[in-house]
Image (cartoon, rainbow, N blue to C red):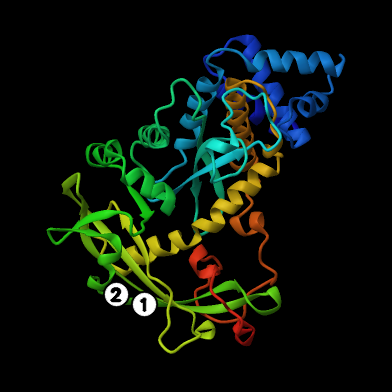
């Protein structure tokens, strides 16, 4: 590390460890250095990368002991959020992703939930909620906040409470800047939680979420399921964009996707006085159409903005939601660059500390060292070096619903 980068590193670790004692500050700096050098979250790898003039066993023991310090995870999380929140602008998309941290072979990690209690994963796991700022133009990702929890922990209530606590912390730290983008599963969970509806109304949460037919909304004074509303929404705006979609011979082909979209005002039954916007997007892939007039099911999104009617505003929301699946894949790749799935510590608090320090390490690389990989570079899912020449808008990212199209004839589009 050059002298200038070393100065930036020590400035960063001083802020990250603010409020901690001298020993804990040294520990924070050592772990970040070890992660940067080893590209690993395993304590042994970190200890070896530090290259201390003592036996690796001694360094490993010291790091393990310091991981268990009371309150360390909360302090690191709070200080990191204070730094990351400053970079969030008014319209910055805040991609909110919830996933299981699976520990297939672990048996002794504290509060680990057994596979029998998690049929959706099939393996023992913890739950993780991450909020990542995303720039749709440059494709750069930046971690904002991360929280891990166990359904076996003594203070656990339910998943919606854990997620809402993360959203509240971020919303407070950013002073309301940024827009939370939630996937359909998280959105459905949160919309069923009464505290979320109350918080949206009281705290002015700004969000966009995919929604499914399981959710009920008030539309023109009547309570309706989501799937009963789309045919009542006009779609006056349209755009043709080009996406990479896997076609014949398992090759990704640049393919035309025709979209039309519009919105209507709705509200949640719990807060009928708070107007929201329901955005409906029809999409069609002409080259993959198997029957005359056959199209995919419309994509439906709920926005906290009360009157999303202008084409530019609608198009910006739709474009960002289209990119979320690949953003989530890129987030996972970013963590796996440090072998996060191999983390193996016995106690719950140590796991929380390591997750916070991993996010701090990624933030330091992205925001301080300016190593700014884009979503496309992280996912590495595109087999074409460049798109066809032309003036059509191309984002090269699509919702998973579009990826499932039987596109046997897509090869003709290349």
Q: Position of residue 35 (x, y in %)?
A: 72, 32
Q: Is residue 405 or residue 28 the one in the foreground?
A: 405
Q: From this viewpoint, is residue 92 visible?
A: no
Image x and y of residue 14, in percent? 59, 21
Where does the image place residue 66, in percent across and percent down from the top left? 66, 14
Residue 329: image tag: none
According to the picture, the residue beneath numbered tag 2 turns out to be 235
Q: Residue furthest bottom?
A: 292
Q: Are marks 1 and 2 in contact (CB under 8 Å)?
A: yes
Residue appearing at x 44%, y 64% in the figure: 319
Up the image or down, 171 lies above or below 242; here it is above
Q: Camera-side residue: 346 or 373?
A: 346
Q: Which of marks 1 and 2 is in front?
A: 2
Callout 2: helix, strand or loop?
loop
Label 1 environment density (alpha carbons within 10 Å; few <14, some 14–19, many ≥20): some
Q: Nearer the viewer, residue 172 or 356?
A: 356
Q: Residues within 10 Å of mark 2 (few under 14, many from 20)?
A: some
Residue drawn where x is 59% and y is 72% of the image = 245
**Residue designated by label 1:** 238
255 relative to 370, above or below? below
Q: Distance between the residues labelled 1 and 2?
A: 8 Å
Q: In this view, does 381 lie above or below 155?
A: below
Answer with left or right where residue 305 lies relative to residue 364: left
């Amino acid at each position: 590390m050059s002298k200038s980068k070393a100065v930036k590193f020590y400035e960063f670790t001083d802020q990250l460890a603010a409020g901690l004692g001298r020993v804990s500050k040294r520990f924070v700096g050592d772990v970040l250095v070890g992660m940067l050098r080893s590209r690993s979250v395993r304590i042994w790898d970190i200890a070896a990368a530090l290259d201390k003039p003592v036996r690796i066993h001694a360094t490993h023991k010291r790091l393990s002991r310091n991981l268990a310090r009371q309150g360390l995870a909360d302090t690191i999380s709070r200080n990191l959020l204070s730094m990351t929140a400053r970079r969030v602008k008014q319209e910055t998309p805040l991609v909110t992703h919830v996933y299981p941290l699976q520990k297939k072979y672990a048996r002794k990690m504290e509060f680990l939930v057994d596979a029998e209690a998690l049929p959706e994963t099939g393996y023992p796991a913890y739950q993780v909620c991450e909020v990542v700022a995303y720039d749709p133009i440059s494709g750069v990702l930046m971690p904002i906040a991360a929280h891990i929890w166990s359904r076996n922990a003594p203070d656990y209530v339910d998943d919606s409470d854990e997620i809402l606590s993360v959203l509240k912390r971020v919303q407070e730290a950013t002073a309301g800047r940024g827009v939370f983008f939630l996937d359909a599963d998280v959105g459905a969970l949160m919309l069923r939680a009464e505290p979320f509806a109350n918080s949206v109304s009281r705290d002015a949460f700004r969000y966009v979420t995919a929604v499914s037919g399981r959710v009920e909304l008030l539309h023109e004074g009547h309570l309706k399921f989501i799937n009963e509303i789309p045919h009542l929404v006009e779609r006056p705006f349209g755009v043709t964009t080009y996406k990479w979609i896997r076609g014949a011979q398992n090759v990704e082909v640049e393919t035309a996707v025709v979209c039309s979209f519009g919105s209507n005002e709705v509200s949640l039954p719990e807060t009928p006085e708070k107007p929201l916007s329901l955005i409906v997007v029809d999409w069609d892939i002409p080259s993959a159409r198997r029957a005359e007039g056959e199209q995919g099911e419309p994509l439906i999104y709920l926005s906290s903005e009360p009157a999303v009617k202008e084409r530019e505003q609608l198009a910006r929301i739709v474009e960002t939601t289209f990119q979320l699946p690949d953003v989530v894949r890129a987030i996972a790749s970013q963590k796996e660059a440090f072998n996060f799935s191999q983390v193996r510590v016995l106690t719950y608090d140590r796991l929380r500390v390591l997750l916070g320090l991993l996010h701090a390490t990624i933030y330091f690389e992205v925001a301080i060292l300016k190593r700014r990989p884009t979503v496309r570079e992280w996912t590495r899912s595109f087999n074409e070096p460049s798109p066809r020449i032309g003036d059509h808008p191309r984002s090269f990212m699509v919702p998973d619903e579009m990826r499932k199209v039987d596109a046997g004839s897509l090869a003709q589009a290349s």
